[in-house]
Image (spheres, rainbow, N blue to C red):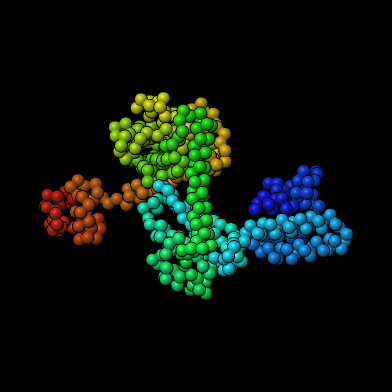
Amino acid sequence: MLAFIKERFQVRQCKSFKNQDRACLNYHIKKCLAPCMGYVSKEEYHKQIDQIILLLEGKIDAIMKELNSEMKQCAENQDYEKAAEIRDRMQAIERVSEKQKVSNISEHNIDVIGLSKNEMTVCIEIFFIRGSKMIGREHYFFNDLKDMAEEEIISGFIKQFYFEKQDLPNKIMMRFALEEKETLEKYLSDKAGRKVELKSPQKGEKLRFVEMAEMNSKITLENKLKDKSEILLELKEVLNLAELPTKIESFDISNIAGSFIVAGMCVAQNGVIKRNLSRRFKIKTVLAQDDPKCMEEVVSRRLKHSLENPDGGFGKLPNLILADGGITQIRAIQNALKENGLEHEIPVFGMVKDDKHSTRALMNANREEVDISEPLFHFITNLQDEVHKTAIEYHRKVRDKEMTKSKLDTISGIGEKKRTALLQKFGSVKKIKEATIEEIAEVKGINLTLAKKIKEEL
């Protein structure tokens, strides 16, 4: 459709709209009206935009009526070349319109839902049929739903997709008859102010369209996986890796002025970020703010997990490590690899940020920045955002827990049950402090010796 619009409508295709010294090639080959040069009025140019919008909405009759009027006007003015251009455009639109037509479906307002899934991802494709024409389609991906029944997935999708949608169809078609059919129909009908039906056709043209939506969802899912493979292939090539980076791990350190120091680890497997494989670490050996030392400790601990137990929670070793930072973080990770005898086994690169804290490039151990394509840039940015989020969220959790910790937690012999019992009886640490040893000893599980110790500590 985009190719057709570029071919048949003279709209600008340049990315920047600046006044030029002369019109570009597109103007001379009649692919653009050169609004940058003022060769067309705003009103005339916007006429084309309005026609494109009508075309995308499937309102072909309105376009044809308008173009026919323009063609007649051009013929009357003896502008036969312009009239011929409009005629050709009308014929082309008619051909495109024929491709949009849905044969043998008389209803004017239907959505068709198709679903496909693999081990990791579910793809739902939805066709929009309006005025007996297919006017568009959309697709959505959902992770971690592989254990759900397909009927349950579609039922959940309908609830989410149509919750805020204003333009509801008369019918929604899908493969399965849903258990919640009556409830959903009532909700959608009340929302639309008219009857909305959920149908699962068993034969004929309508079933063919459900099958087509399912086939499209399958192709879309395959293309998504293909895109991931291409990203990994590009990553292998631009970083000059010995093998495809099917398991990438990224690390980030989070703290406030050296307090509550933690780290986050994020994993991308086969080009997909796997949140269930994320890990969080409390720093054990570094007491002051020293991010490189913290990074070295965390990566070393992570490597030991796989070296000692390859089938454990951390799984196999990664074949690429990305640090959230520059050369100092790269060297810290290399030190950790060397400690564990893996300095020649796993390549390390840094994810360098700009002054706005956004990913700018990848950097190697020689401080050389590696140019990457836009799809790869988005992948790296998503990975960096995910590991940063993991570290930050854990840091907040640790900080909040430490800041709300009771003085009782520091007294040996007081566990969670005894602390809870004390606070339930007295209401606060202040009230416990004011109580007598005998009163404290009345609490279940606390003898006179421990009561005396509590009183002294408080």
Left or right: residue 357 versus residue 456 is right
Q: Residue at x 34, y 38 (%)?
A: 314
In this rendering, the answer to whether 220 lies above or below 101 is: above
Q: Nearer the viewer, residue 184 or 238?
A: 184
In this rendering, the answer to whether 313 lies above or below 68 is: above
In this rendering, the answer to whether 68 lies above or below 37 is: below
Image coords of residue 223 (percent x, y) = 52, 45
Q: Nearer the viewer, residue 1 or 203?
A: 203
Image coords of residue 17 (percent x, y) = 72, 48
Quarter-of-image position of residue 330: top left
Q: Residue at x 42, y 37 (%)?
A: 247
Kindly tell me whether residue 145 is visible in this rendering: yes
In the picture as drawn, the residue positioned furthest to the left comes out as 448
Image coords of residue 431 (percent x, y) = 23, 58
Kindly tell me whether residue 140 is visible in this rendering: no
Q: Residue at x 14, y 50 (%)?
A: 450
Q: Nearer the viewer, residue 382 or 140?
A: 140
Q: Residue at x 69, y 53 (%)?
A: 5
